[in-house]
Image: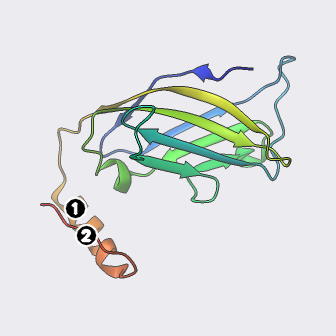
């Protein structure tokens, strides 16, 4: 089955969450126990730059969310969307079964809806959190 085309708008500076159910041809939810998933956002399909990388490993994707078979939860936290200074991209969402077979569930375009209200403390919290994590180099742009 080909990936469903689903375009996404993400609000800059706000929590992005999408929950949906993957069903088979008989409208039965697919049990994804012990499966993995990955979603990447890039500027263009063939671009090497990954703008966002969500996975079951990094907590950006939850399969059988809430204990319900077939339920998928995608989440990008405010601290991440607050730093989205790009405007468009493309994505796809793949799930991998226990035999490492890949199923592309969704694909489409991403649009960022720019934030108008800027909360001064938000940048401070993000910076403070970054300073606590000395395991990586970073650049602060103010």
Image point 23% across, 39% down: which residue?
115
Instruction: Give residue 104's quadrant in the image.
Output: top right
Image point 61% across, 42% down: which residue?
73
Q: Which mark is residue 127?
A: 2
Q: Indicate the position of residue 117 as horizontal and vertical percent values.
A: 18, 43
Image point 70% across, 30% down: which residue?
21
Q: On the picture, is 45 further left or further right than 69?
A: left
Which image quadrant: the C terminus?
bottom left
Secondary structure under the numbered disc 2 in the rendered image = helix
The mark tally for this picture is 2
Contact between marks 1 and 2 (CB within 8 A): the answer is yes
Q: Indicate the position of residue 135 as horizontal and vertical percent values.
A: 40, 80
Which image quadrant: the N terminus?
top right
Closer to the camera in the image, 142 or 97 = 97
Secondary structure under the numbered disc 1 in the rendered image = helix
Q: Which residue is mark 1?
A: 123
């Amino acid at each position: 089955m080909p990936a469903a085309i689903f375009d996404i708008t993400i609000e800059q500076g706000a929590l992005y969450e999408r929950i949906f159910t993957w069903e088979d041809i008989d409208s039965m939810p697919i049990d994804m126990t012990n499966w993995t998933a990955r979603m990447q956002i890039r500027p263009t399909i063939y671009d090497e730059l990954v703008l966002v990388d969500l996975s079951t490993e990094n907590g950006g994707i939850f399969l059988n969310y809430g204990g319900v078979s077939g339920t998928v939860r995608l989440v990008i936290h405010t601290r991440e969307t607050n730093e989205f200074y790009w405007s468009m991209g493309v994505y796809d969402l793949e799930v991998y079964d226990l035999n490492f077979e890949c199923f592309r569930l969704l694909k489409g375009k991403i649009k960022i809806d720019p934030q108008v209200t800027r909360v001064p403390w938000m940048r401070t919290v993000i910076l403070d959190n970054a300073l606590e994590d000395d395991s990586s180099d970073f650049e602060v742009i103010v």
